[in-house]
Image (spheres, rainbow, N blue to C red):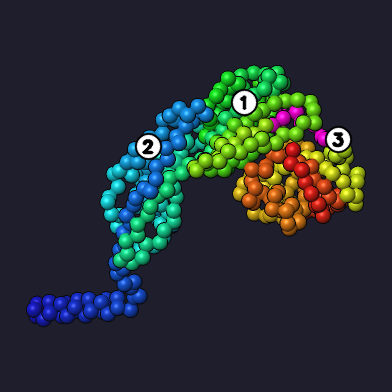
């Protein structure tokens, strides 16, 4: 009797196992895919590593074995994050897309004397394929050095100003001569009188730019403009002059004055405050999406839409020269705009049929 019971149990168990196995055959299992591989090489190492304009060594480690290598799938899964010299010679990965970056240092802006060199690529690794990456190291951040006239220091007394980016401040004393390094997002130059902050200007720099900004203050109609640009093989060495006390040029209307000239063709003075205007908002930092319009205001710290003008950028030279999608560095620039004042454009008083402009 006992043997018959055990035999029945065994038969039942076998039937159950066969049932499960049979059931499993109905699942759509993905076929096993042969992995791919990534190999790496560095095509060039920058030798123009200067930080303060006097061609002194910046302290950047040029031993590429100490560079930081990051490999992540495009869905965010880490493959490798560490020293380039400690990587496996061949990195085996599943077929798919990967973001690969090589960096001379980890960089959190703003920071003195830390140019960051490297390269970033997105690659696709096929099944059973070996993908080789050759890095071309270039400067990935931007350098900013400030020079102050005596008139500027007299108008803004104290120890100096600060550079603000990503809600972090870097104090820049009036006697400072080093480059501060920034990301390619917008930054503000801020003065604090001990009571409140004043934003003196807002600007965006491009990767590889090494900018010397000469700051002055004068009650005059002197224009503030780019003086010169020198380009080498890896970086742009640029000098800007800014007059923080810039007045409205003779013959131009202020934004407040232009409000009473609806329907008239006039020349209006303002600062490029932002872009992407809508009936409810504007964007004051990159990235921008629309090339067809921007917003000007009487000052960069203006936040009342009643004191802003939306400006139409018709296709052609006006749009090519001013749109903030391809020219984000125009933010903060003083400008003269010639066009017709309209009562409503994106919910603002605005300028349409823009004919020409002058950047000051």
Indicate the position of residue 208 as horizontal and vertical percent values. 52, 41
Give the mark, 1 or 2, whose residue is nearer the N terminus. 2
Q: Residue at x 59, y 31 (%)?
A: 212
Q: Label 1 to label 2, Cα distance in Å?
A: 29 Å
Question: Vertical placement of 2 versus 358: above or below?
Answer: below
Q: Quadrant of the N terminus?
A: bottom left
Indicate the position of residue 137 as horizontal and vertical percent values. 43, 45
Q: Residues within 10 Å of mark 2 (few under 14, many from 20)?
A: some
69 left or right of 201 in image: left
Depth check, front residue: 347 or 227: 227
Depth check, front residue: 239 or 295: 239
Q: Secondary structure at mark 1?
A: strand
Q: Residue at x 73, y 57 (%)?
A: 316
63 left or right of 303 in image: left
Q: Residue at x 43, y 29 (%)?
A: 57
Indicate the position of residue 130 as horizontal and vertical percent values. 32, 61
The residue labelled by disc 3 is 250
Question: Vertical placement of 240 versus 293: above or below?
Answer: above
Q: Quadrant of the C terminus?
A: top right
Give the mark, 2 or 3, whose residue is nearer the N terminus. 2
Q: Residues within 10 Å of mark 3 (few under 14, many from 20)?
A: few
Q: Is residue 279 visible?
A: no
- Where residue 147 is drawn, which disc sits there? 1
The residue labelled by disc 2 is 62
Q: Residues within 10 Å of mark 1 (few under 14, many from 20)?
A: some
Q: Residue at x 32, y 64 (%)?
A: 129
């Amino acid at each position: 009797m006992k043997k018959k019971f055990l035999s029945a149990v065994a038969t039942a168990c076998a039937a159950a196992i066969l049932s499960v196995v049979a059931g499993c055959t109905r699942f759509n299992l993905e076929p096993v895919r042969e992995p791919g591989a990534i190999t790496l090489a560095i095509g060039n190492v920058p030798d123009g590593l200067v930080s303060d304009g006097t061609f002194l060594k910046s302290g950047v480690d040029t031993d590429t074995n100490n560079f930081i290598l990051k490999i992540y799938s495009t869905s965010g899964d880490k493959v490798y994050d560490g020293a380039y010299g400690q990587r496996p010679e061949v990195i085996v990965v599943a077929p798919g897309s990967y973001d690969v970056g090589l960096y001379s240092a980890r960089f959190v802006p703003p920071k003195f004397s830390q140019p960051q060199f490297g390269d970033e690529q997105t690659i696709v690794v096929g099944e059973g394929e070996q993908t080789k990456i050759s890095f071309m190291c270039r400067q990935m951040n931007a350098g900013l050095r400030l020079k102050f006239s005596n008139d500027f220091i007299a108008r803004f007394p104290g120890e100096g100003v600060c550079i603000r980016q990503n809600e972090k401040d870097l104090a820049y004393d009036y006697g400072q001569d080093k480059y501060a390094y920034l990301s390619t997002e917008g930054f503000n130059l801020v003065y604090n009188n001990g009571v409140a902050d004043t934003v003196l200007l807002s600007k965006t720099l491009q990767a590889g730019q090494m900018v010397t900004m000469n700051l002055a203050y004068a009650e005059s109609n002197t224009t503030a403009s780019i003086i010169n640009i020198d380009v080498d093989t890896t970086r742009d060495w640029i000098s800007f002059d800014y007059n923080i006390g810039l007045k409205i040029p003779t013959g131009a209307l202020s934004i407040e004055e232009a409000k009473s000239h609806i329907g008239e063709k006039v020349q209006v003075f303002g600062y490029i405050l932002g872009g992407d205007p809508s009936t409810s908002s504007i964007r004051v930092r990159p990235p921008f999406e629309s090339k067809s319009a921007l917003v000007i205001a009487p000052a960069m710290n203006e936040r009342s839409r009643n004191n802003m003008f939306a400006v139409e950028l018709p296709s052609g030279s006006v749009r090519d020269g001013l749109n903030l999608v391809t020219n984000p560095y125009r933010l903060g620039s003083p400008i003269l705009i010639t066009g017709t004042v309209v009562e409503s454009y994106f919910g603002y008083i605005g300028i349409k049929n823009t004919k020409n402009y002058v950047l000051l």
